[in-house]
């Protein structure tokens, strides 16, 4: 190859590299700018996670079968969420609520309707939670019997779902939301296998633990 042709090849390579750099800048620059804007918005607004409160529980049934160590429960809860942010709205895209005993789920998840929560707003839900003949591990059945004898059982009301933040017209991506509300239930005479009489309502007003 002649020196002239070799110089042309180098020139073409340089032009090609410049083109690649230009394309990379055009693609990456908007992404970086958007990321910086989102980061600045986050630093300025600092979204605060919602505050959940378990207000009450109405127990319609809480029955454990001594023969099969299976638990049947029927309860209605009232749970509220407050948006503490003055400039940020919250979309609850999906939220399932259920009850657990010593980390074992004892009711089916009940889905709450998707909703939007404005600045400083409070949302209240009153779902029913059901669990029919839910098998308990033998050691859990023993623990439940001991708790009944002691007179108090700790049941955790949990919520799990997805939320999004809204600032003006900007809406963030989805964030996972986990809520845990401890509820101490007082047990009386369990004649007939029932731990509580039907339709016993417990006023709690207990603050829940929230992770986003």
Image (cartoon, rainbow, N blue to C red):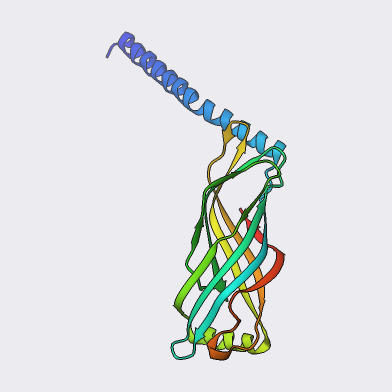
The answer to whether 34 is drawn above or below residue 189 in the figure is: above
49 vs 184, nearest the viewer: 184
Residue in the picture at 62% in, 56% down: 211
Q: Where is residue 209 in the image (x, y as percent from the top left)?
A: 66, 61
Image x and y of residue 12, in percent: 36, 15
Query: Taking the image as drawn, is residue 86 in sight?
Result: yes
Count of residue discs: 0
Check the picture and name the quadrant holding the N terminus.
Answer: top left
Residue 3 occupies which quadrant of the picture?
top left
Nearer to me, 76 or 173:
76
Answer yes or no: is residue 91 visible: no
> Would residue 13 be found to the left or right of residue 190 on screen?
left
| In-image side of 183 versus 29 (left or right) | right
Residue at 67% across / 85% down in the picture? 151
Residue found farthest to the top: 4
* Image spot of residue 49 (x, y percent): 66, 50
| In the image: residue 193, left or right of residue 48 | left
Which residue is at the far left? 1
State the residue in front, 46 or 25. 46
At x 44%, y 22%, the residue is: 23
Q: Which of 192 and 88 is in front in this view?
A: 192
Instruction: Say if 79 sits above or below 162 in the image.
Output: below
> Where's residue 28, x and y in %?
50, 28
């Amino acid at each position: 190859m002649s020196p002239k042709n070799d110089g042309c090849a180098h020139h073409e390579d340089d032009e090609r590299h410049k083109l690649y750099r230009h394309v990379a800048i055009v693609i990456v620059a908007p992404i970086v700018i958007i990321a910086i804007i989102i980061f600045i918005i986050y630093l300025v607004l600092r979204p605060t996670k919602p505050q959940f409160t378990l207000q009450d529980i109405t127990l319609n049934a809480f029955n454990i079968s001594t023969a099969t160590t299976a638990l049947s429960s029927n309860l209605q809860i009232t749970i509220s969420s407050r948006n503490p942010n003055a400039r940020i709205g919250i979309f609850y895209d999906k939220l399932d609520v259920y009850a657990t005993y010593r980390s074992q789920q004892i009711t089916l998840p009940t889905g709450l309707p998707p909703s939007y929560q404005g600045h400083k707003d409070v949302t209240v839900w009153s779902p029913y939670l059901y669990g029919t003949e839910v098998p308990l591990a033998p050691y859990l059945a023993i623990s439940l019997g001991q708790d009944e004898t002691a007179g108090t059982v700790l049941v955790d009301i949990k919520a799990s779902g997805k939320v999004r933040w809204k600032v003006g017209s900007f809406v963030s991506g989805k964030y996972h939301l986990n809520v845990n509300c401890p509820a101490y239930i007082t047990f009386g005479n369990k004649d007939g296998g029932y731990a509580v009489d039907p339709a016993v309502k417990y006023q709690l007003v207990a603050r829940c633990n929230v992770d986003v």
